[in-house]
Image (cartoon, rainbow, N blue to C red):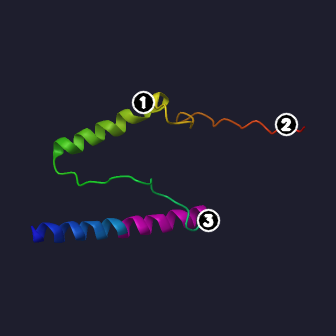
Amino acid sequence: MLIGCLALTRISGRRRTYKSLVSRRINNLRRSPSAPVWQRNYHEHIIRSHRALNAIRQHLRDNPARWALDCYSSRPTPGEAPAIPASPQAH
């Protein structure tokens, strides 16, 4: 059990380092220091089999088609122009 915990700690450390380096690079390119890059409250896991990998690949292929069906998303469908907010009315 201890060996498994050590391996997971190393993987977590590598993931944390990777995400930190990628975030720094993206924010440098965007000229937006400290801006969030990664989705919050996202649970990551280790892909342990080819079956799990194929299921994730299928999800990534199918997900854009389901975008318009997402009742929680107010964002435009990928490829669609974002809505322009109405200007405030002067009273």
Residue at screen point 17% across, 41% down: 51
Q: Which amino acid does the dot numbered 1 rest on?
A: Arg
For label 2, the SS is loop
Q: Residue 31 shows which numbered tag?
A: 3
- SS assignment for the magenta stretch, majority: helix
**The one of 51 and 3 positioned closer to us in this rendering:** 3
What residue lies at 81% left-to-right and 39% top-to-bottom? 88
**Extreme-front residue of the structure:** 91
Specify the quadrant of the image occupied by residue 55: top left
Point out the frontmost of discs 2 and 3. 2
What is the three-letter code of the residue carrying label 3?
Answer: Arg
Residue at the farthest top position: 69
- Say which label, 2 or 1, has the lower sequence index: 1
Q: Mark 1 points at which residue?
A: 66
Q: Do the residues labelled 1 and 3 touch (CB within 8 Å)?
A: no
Question: How far is disc 1 from disc 3 in space, using C-alphas?
Answer: 32 Å
